[in-house]
Image: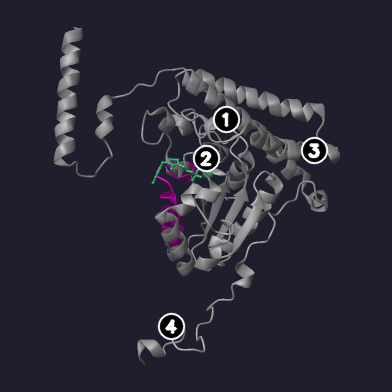
């Protein structure tokens, strides 16, 4: 059989011989983002889950505020806040089993903390102290990833390897809207679908890649639609509706665990703060837009539901606030201690075999440090 005789081969003459090899209809996302809060479906939501999500959202909001304050006090080099995106962060952590893996980006400190990473260790990288402050294997949380989308092929590799070994492991990878324009996004999704790897991709579409609005970097109908081209389902969800995100991600994780392959979930949300403390968001967006999103705040949406169902009394509210203040106080106390650092560690773990240039730079630094030490005596 020649190549041209194979099923599905491109035939240039009419009638068009091409046919989709997979029916794309079941892969298409819904026209509107999936919502639970504020709809009739909310009445079915488990009260325990609602309370748990609420407590975590309040903790997360306080963590974001405290970390941002620490940047202003010179205790943290940089903090990409996830204020406004806490529902995605928390739901991503809660849907996973202990044996699963989370692959976060630099904005996903909260997801790492919600999964059990020490709140101070989660900030080590952003403080500039060390490569990663926590052992990724302890809670199965990969290092916070700064190069955009490079965490995605890692997640696919881990998920595929786990399946080959017969381990029951699902990988959940987080990425931003801007990250979906990276080559690594394409390669990860392509391989994930071809291999039917047990991986879930959660795109937090927060409207911006630093100052670049979504419309200036993609012409896709939605980011969830990108899934279809790779042969996996795309789901669209209201990223500020914690219950909806939990439900959609939960479905995707179960689907992956059962051997159904990957899913791409686009959560529509908004970055309330600037990109980081080094960014001035007023230069590229107006206050009115931010205010509109504040009215669709993830904590507010959940509070409304809890109150309507009589699940949120003053005591519960106060307990959530107290837990958040305790977390913030611990963060302040521990982040205000100077870390003990060895400047020579700069060169550790860069390559298995240091290059001649690195060896030379290491020797230079050592000589300078020794000279300084002698001057100090
Ligand atoms: C490969 C790569 N290119 C460029 C950058 C610089 N950069 C850091 S954050 C960012 C924007 C990313 O936007 P998005 O993916 O939407 O994530 P968000 O910050 O909104 O969470 C860019 C371009 C980078 N970190 N890595
Ligand atoms: Mg973004």
Please state, as top left, top right, bottom left or bottom right, where the N terminus lies in the image: bottom left
Q: Is residue 175 visible?
A: no
| Residue 177 picture location, percent across and down | 52, 49
Q: What residue is shown with label 4?
A: 10
Nearest to viewer (mark 4 / mark 3): 4
Q: Would the CB of label 1 be found within 8 Å of ligand 1? A: no
The outermost residue toward the top is 377
Q: What residue is shown with label 3?
A: 304
Q: For the magenta stretch, what is the residue range?
A: 139-160
Q: What residue is shown with label 1?
A: 64
Q: Residue at x 44, y 45 (%)?
A: 142
364 is higher (above) or lower (below) than 86: above
- Between marks 4 and 1, how big is the CA–CA gap? 53 Å
CB contact under 8 Å: marks 3 and 1: no
- The answer to whether residue 237 is left or right of residue 220 is right
| Residue 185 picture location, percent across and down | 45, 56
Q: Secondary structure at mark 3?
A: helix
- Between marks 3 and 1, how big is the CA–CA gap? 22 Å
Nearest to viewer (mark 2 / mark 4): 4
Q: Earlier in the sequence, mark 3 or mark 1?
A: 1
Please state, as top left, top right, bottom left or bottom right, where the C terminus lies in the image: top left
168 is higher (above) or lower (below) than 280: below
* In front of the other: 322 or 10: 10
Q: Residue at x 53, y 26 (%)?
A: 67
Nearest to viewer (mark 4 / mark 1): 4
Identify the disc placed on residue 108. 2
- Between marks 2 and 4, how big is the CA–CA gap? 43 Å
């Amino acid at each position: 059989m020649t190549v041209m005789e194979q099923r599905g081969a491109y035939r240039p003459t009419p009638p068009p011989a091409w046919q989709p090899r997979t029916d794309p209809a079941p892969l298409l996302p819904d026209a509107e983002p999936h919502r639970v809060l504020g709809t009739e479906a909310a009445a079915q939501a488990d009260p325990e889950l609602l309370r748990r999500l609420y407590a975590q959202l309040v903790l997360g909001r306080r963590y974001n505020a405290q970390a941002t304050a620490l940047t202003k006090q010179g205790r943290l080099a940089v903090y990409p806040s996830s204020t406004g995106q806490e529902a995605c962060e928390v739901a991503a952590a809660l849907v996973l089993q202990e044996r699963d893996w989370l692959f976060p980006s630099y904005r996903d400190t909260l997801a790492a903390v919600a999964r059990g990473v020490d709140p101070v260790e989660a900030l080590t990288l952003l403080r500039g102290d060390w490569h990663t402050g926590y052992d990724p294997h302890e809670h199965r949380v990969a290092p916070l990833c700064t190069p955009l989308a490079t965490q995605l092929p890692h997640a696919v590799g881990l998920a595929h390897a786990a399946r080959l070994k017969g381990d029951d492991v699902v990988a959940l990878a987080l990425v931003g809207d801007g990250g979906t324009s990276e080559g690594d996004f394409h390669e990860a999704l392509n391989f994930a679908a071809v291999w039917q790897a047990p991986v879930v991709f959660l795109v937090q579409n927060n409207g911006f890649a630093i100052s670049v609005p979504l419309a200036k970097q993609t012409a896709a109908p939605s980011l969830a639609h990108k899934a279809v081209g790779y042969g996996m389902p795309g789901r669209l969800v209201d990223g500020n509706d914690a219950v909806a995100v939990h439900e959609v991600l939960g479905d995707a994780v179960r689907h992956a665990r059962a051997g159904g392959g990957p899913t791409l979930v686009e959560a529509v949300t908004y970055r309330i703060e600037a990109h980081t403390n080094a960014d001035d968001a007023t230069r590229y967006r107006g206050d009115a837009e931010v205010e509109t999103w504040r009215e669709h705040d993830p904590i507010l949406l959940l509070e409304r539901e809890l109150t309507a169902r009589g699940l949120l009394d003053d005591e519960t509210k106060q307990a959530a606030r107290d837990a958040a203040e305790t977390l913030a106080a611990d963060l302040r106390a521990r982040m205000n201690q100077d870390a003990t650092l060895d400047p020579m560690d700069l060169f550790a773990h860069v390559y298995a075999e240091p290059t001649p240039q690195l060896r030379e730079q290491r020797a230079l630094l050592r000589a300078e440090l020794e000279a300084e030490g002698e001057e100090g005596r």
